Amino acid sequence: MESVRWLNDEETDLWISFLAVSQMVERLVDQQLRRDFNISHSDYEILARLSQAPGRWLRMGELANTIVAPKSRLSHQMERLEKSGWVERKNCPTDGRGVVAELTEAGLDLLIGIAPAHVTTVRENFIDLIPQEQLEPTLQALKAVLKSIPGAPQSLVECDPAEVTTGTPTCETDTTSNEECPESWAK
Amino acid sequence: MESVRWLNDEETDLWISFLAVSQMVERLVDQQLRRDFNISHSDYEILARLSQAPGRWLRMGELANTIVAPKSRLSHQMERLEKSGWVERKNCPTDGRGVVAELTEAGLDLLIGIAPAHVTTVRENFIDLIPQEQLEPTLQALKAVLKSIPGAPQSLVECDPAEVTTGTPTCETDTTSNEECPESWAK
DNA sequence: TGAACATTGTTGAATGTTAAACAATTCCCG
DNA sequence: CGGGAATTGTTTAACATTCAACAATGTTCA
């Protein structure tokens, strides 16, 4: 005899809307990438995250965590991306079990070609649709969810990949991540 | 020579966090349903939406829209659900092309058995993680996105399926949807 | 040291999803 | 009415994802 705390109207609305937005936005973004560049959104995410990593490489596990994918999926994706020449896998020098995923020059070029249109899609179908005054509270809500779920990834900065070729660390230690994505890039 | 409006830090953070939360929450919810009840979240959604529809049935197209799925996916899902006896397909009496998806008694019973645990999962991994003061702005943000995307579904109310057996319309015409999901249901 | 255990990543088979082509029906309008 | 266009839903085949089992390496600690 357990008493269930059903969702009230507002909570229900929030949950249903969240599901709908998640799926619609994901679908729109994915379809734009497939249609215009013949690449899936999840493949794009791999390239993008690698491009921002210190030496444009990440351990497989880290990468999987970052894009919130099971390891097995990442393995399959990497196999395809590697065949296309956009990514390389190397044995990790510091851990015999480990594998390092590295973005190739070709992969970076591809990403640089795609990013502008992608950002536009993200704006048109998500960011620019949200009224200014709700940006910050929404971000806080999302971060609260992330914080409470064990194993959730850090936030990373997504920006012009053409500018992120230096290998400057974005993670943990050096948190002056602002410098990496100045608004002045909008040239 | 197009000038790209890259995302600034806050926007980037919002986008990345949104993607992460979407995938993490969807995964957690889906896994709980599979583990405890051997049903996928998307199958659950079908049962839930049908249970709230006027006579516990919907046109295939409406249903696909509601759950934000391509029609082809819904067809496959329905085939499986029909085999399991939780749903039935009938020819639509008013449109020769149409097909009507109807929840069976068995399907409703299943849903009633599952719903409490499901709601708990949704609370634990999403709703209850969001601070009170961000609930409303977040909802507004999501609704703004939905409103601006053509073909986005209406919000529906998700509540105790045991109570929604009367066939009272929730859509369009009768918008006193509050009555359907009073907080007092939390018994 | 070495034996149990933990971690890392891959593999293969089962399953689910997708886009495109299709058949059936209805709608629009001359 | 009747013919072209639009809508509805299914099907097929290609593709992607998932889980569980696995191999390989690292870690712990007696």
Image (spheres, coloured by chain):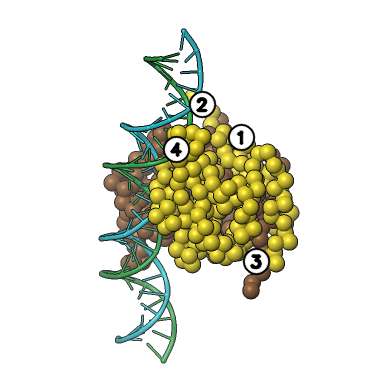
Chain colours: A yellow, B brown, C green, D cyan
Label 2 and label 3: CA atoms lie apart by: 54 Å
Q: Pointer 1 and pointer 2: residues touching (CB < 8 Å)?
A: no
The label shown at residue A148 is 1
Count of numbered labels shown in the rendering: 4
Q: Which residue is mark 3?
A: B4
- Looking at the rendered structure, the kind of residue marked 1 is Ser
Location of residue A172 by image quarter: top right
Which residue is nearer to you in this view: A97 or D10?
A97
Other residues around mark 2 within 10 Å, as few (<14) / some (14–19) / many (≥20): few
Mark nearest the camera among 2 and 3 is 3
Mark nearest the camera among 3 and 4 is 3
Q: Describe the element under mark 2 as helix, strand or loop.
A: loop
Looking at the rendered structure, whether the residues under marks 2 and 3 are on a common chain is answered as no
Q: Describe the element under mark 4 as helix, strand or loop.
A: helix
Q: Pointer 3 and pointer 4: residues touching (CB < 8 Å)?
A: no
Q: Which residue is mark 4?
A: B31
Label 3 and label 4: CA atoms lie apart by: 39 Å
Q: Which residue is mark 2?
A: A2
Mark nearest the camera among 3 and 1 is 3
Looking at the rendered structure, whether the residues under marks 1 and 4 are on a common chain is answered as no
Asked whether residue A8 appears in the rendered view, the answer is: no
Q: Earlier in the sequence, mark 3 or mark 4?
A: 3
Q: Residue at x 66, y 69 (%)?
A: B3
Residue A75, given in percent of the width and then of the height, sits at 42, 45
Other residues around mark 4 within 10 Å, as few (<14) / some (14–19) / many (≥20): some
Q: Residue at x 64, y 42 (%)?
A: A171
Residue A72, given in percent of the width and then of the height, sits at 41, 42
